[in-house]
Image (cartoon, coloured by chain):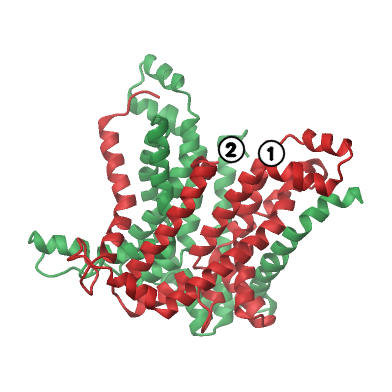
Chain colours: A red, B green
Amino acid sequence: MGRTHPALVAVTVAIYAFLLAPLVIVIGAAFSETTYLAFPPQGLSLKWFANALANSDFRRSFVTSMEVALLGTGLALVAGAPAAYALARFRPRLPRGMGNMFVLPILVPEIVTGFALLKLLAVDWSLPILAALTLGHALLVLPYCVRVISANFAAFDFSIEEAAISLGSPPLKTFFTVVLPNVRSAVLAAFVLSFITSLNDVSISVFLTGPGVNTLPIQVLSYVEQYFDPTVAAVSVLLMVLTVGVMAVVERTLGLTTFTK
Amino acid sequence: MKRFAPWMLQAPALALVTVLLIVPVIGVLIVTAGSGRMVAIFQGFLSSGFNQAVIWRTLQVALLTTVLALPIGFAAAYVVARAPGRAKSLLLIAAVFPLLTGVVVRSFAFMVLLGRNGVINNLLLKFGIVDEPLSLLYSQPAVIIGLVYLFTPLMILSLVGVLEGIDESILQASASLGATPAATFRQVILPLAAPGLIVGSVLVFSGSFTAFATPQLLGGDRQMVLATLLYQKAMVDFDWIGASTIATIMMAITFSTIFVMSSLARRLNPTAV
């Protein structure tokens, strides 16, 4: 397309300011010396970071979040990767619209899923909270695992696999030595996307957490409702740093266009 | 053995979706129907003026959010789509980054902006525009601004791909045939972008219709929406039937929106899925 109109550039600058300024303000507030949330920050201090790291509730909920994100994503990958493979490999032998089954967790409102899981897992089955939370997160991220990996399988040339098998390689060995290495970037992308989704989830977690077991976003939510100081800004900055780190890994290995496909 | 391979490979994922989603959600839906009092339960729920207000507020918030996110997302996506290589990926990263930052952090950012000691009030006081801080938080506009902020990146992502696909020669053809830029926009760009606009609108509408954390943090109890009311019924009042009723209403509205919009998309563009 041709040259961009100056007015459009101005509008875009304004839009990007709207998208990024709130995050800049949170970062500023985290380094502030005042006990209330102010921007521009008055004075510079790291005390809110110290405060956040010293808070045992935040530390414990961070560990829970990491555990749940790793386990839930792992479970979703183990279930989702074979499903994605089958969707691409055996398309004609599966019912039409089969792939839609795995998009359902995105279509059903998360708050409804959370409530439904509370009734099933916590009330009817009386599962321990951590187990219920992990299952809930596995369901939450399954669509990302199936979709990202099956998109990559769609471009995969299955004749390589057939060649290996016709040369006498057993099917399972073929899968791990020939098929999987060809889609490993998709598996990594699915993992990262799922991990971040799980780490930030509120609507499902809010029903599946309880006394002693909280995820970080739920802990932040209840902290903000009681206190209103820059500690949460500091926690937010730490979370952003984590996200940037994870995104840097993606950018290095895959390029960010993975997210727009 | 070989005949069942595709099914065996699908089995774990299918089991997850069936056991953890389909069964419990149907369970929630029949709580309202099972006792044979479904009609009575819904009449009871809908006859309350408070509940009606919550439903209207939720619809209004979701609709206004979508209407605001459409032009903002379109303008940004248009610039991203026609930016040269390096700039394009930078702009895309900037749009995706908030998306990965989490709902709580992003809603909290608006508490810092809109609070009594917040950035906006400080500026207004400093320049003498107001004499005392305005109460900007815990209002419907606060919730809507927070949701527009939350979902505009999704609108951008839905549109970038479609706008990239529009061949520049079509625009040149339109201009060389004497169309004004406005006419080209209305009669060429907009129809070609329609699939992306529809996908984006569905994502933003259903996202803001069911959002929980943003209305909770920026709206408080005064701006109760269906999601926060569902949470309160389930976790504070232990009113399971009330919560299930809200869940049913939310499902019905979400799915009919998706259905209507996707059939509209199919009619506009029969070749797309």
* Residue B233 or residue B73, whichever sits in front: B73
Q: Which mark is residue B267?
A: 2
Element at label 2: helix
Q: Chain of mark 1?
A: A
Q: Is residue B109 left or right of residue B77?
A: left
Mark closer to the observer (1, 2): 1
* Residue B2 or residue B250, whichever sits in front: B2
> Count the marks: how many?
2
Q: Is residue A182 left or right of residue B162?
A: right
Q: Residue at x 66, y 66 (%)?
A: B21
Mark 1: few/some/many CA within 10 Å (<14, 14-19, 20+): some
Residue A177 lies in quadrant: top right
Q: Residue at x 36, y 43 (%)?
A: B71
Residue type at mark 2? Arg
Q: Residue furthest right?
A: B1
Q: Is residue A54 left or right of residue B133?
A: right
Report x, y in % for residue B99: 44, 53
Give the residue pinned by disc 1.
Answer: A154
